[in-house]
Image: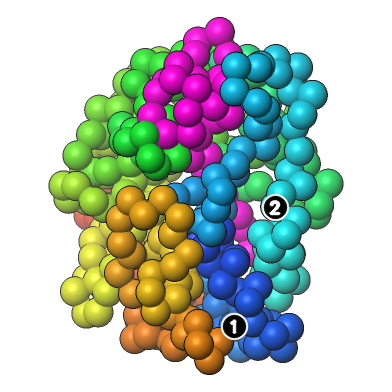
Amino acid sequence: MDDTISHQSVLGLGSSLEHSTCYNLSLLSADQRERVIESLVHPDRGIGMNLMRICIGTSDFAPGPFYTYDDIPAGEEDPRLDHFSVDRDRAYVLPILKAAQRLNPQLRFFASPWTPPPWMKTNGQYGGGFLRPECYPQFAEYLARFIEAYRREGIEIHALTLQNEPEFGPEPYPSCLWTAEQQRDFIRDHLGPLFRARGIKTLIWVFDHNFNHPDFPSTILRDPMAAHHVDGSEFHLYEDRPEAMSKLHREFPTKSIYFTEGSVYGANGATEIISYFRNWSRSYNAWVTMIDQHGEPNVSGFHDCDPTIIVLDRDTLEPDYRADYYIYGQFMKFEKVPGRAKALSAKLGVARHGSRLSGRLA
């Protein structure tokens, strides 16, 4: 390896502070909760996670019931978003996010919606359906109001994804289907101009789904007007291989690539993380940080979750740190050592033809 050659910069590594994790953390005593959050995000007394994914409304991993920030009775609509409110996040989500930010002031959050409000969708449900084209302006406003509401809470949103897994839409599961062309038009004609007009600096990331369809983000980035508003594309691990990220990078070398969802386990998992950075990802994020021994809370019941890096014993309220917690920490600690972050890409063999400086966390 040649340590003088550097490639993409590394934005950060972490996991998610989705509703299941935040709820389980809220069950702990104040002192225990502080210690567990510290063990995750503190740069010295913990493993130093510094990039965390959060949810815009609830995801499938939540104690329930599902909600968005503008829920109204079935059959009604709220085109002016008069009922918009993030108050339901005050129960246990916002307190956990604020505690994590206090313990690591360098912590960044990026946010993903699992579904728009049902009244904006073709089927009027939390699960499935498409965003109605006539509601594109309202959904853009909804995302802008989320960013502004969280800013008032002292939480800046570094980046926003438009939809978790836009090609996956089973009705019991909070979801919304999008085509690449729909996301392109939404960004170009609605979200991008609205962010510019409002002075919102939150980055826009596209796709947020599996390796098997790199043509989805390509379709958006091939449109110059849409691409102008897009910082980069995100991938999940559930189908195909990470070489798809390199394919996308070759076509759009100036656009960032992120790995935003997928927990990996053991030595094979460590190898997988290396492969993401070798294929131009600027980040790694696991999915679901803390679940209990029964895989709860998971109100959708749609799928099980493999053991997370911390498993909460609901009988004793004691956290069990799994081996993967320490494996993740090896990457996070290595990346933050002064003078060594530049070598991360070279050490991992990220690529053989890059030119961008890989420095300390951006």
Q: Which dot marks residue 89?
A: 2
Residue 249, how many percent across, how many down? Answer: 30, 39
Residue 119 in magenta?
A: yes
Q: Which dot marks residue 26?
A: none
| Residue in the picture at 23% in, 61% down | 275
- Which quadrant of the rendered structure holds the N terminus? bottom left
Residue closer to the observer: 343 or 307 = 307
Most distant residue in the front direction: 74
Residue for badge 1: 36
> Distance between the Cα atoms at labels 1 and 2?
20 Å
Residue closer to the observer: 126 or 267 = 126
Q: Is residue 253 above or below residue 242?
A: above
Whether residue 185 is visible here, answered yes or no, is: yes
Most distant residue in the top direction: 134
- Which quadrant of the rendered structure holds the C terminus? bottom right
Q: Residues in magenta?
A: 106-135
Q: Is residue 80 above or below residue 134?
A: below
Give neighbour class at mark 2: few <14, some 14-19, many 20+ (Cα, 10 Å). some
Q: The residue tagged with tag 1: helix, strand or loop?
A: helix
Which amino acid is tagged 1? Answer: Val
| Residue in the picture at 27% in, 74% down | 265
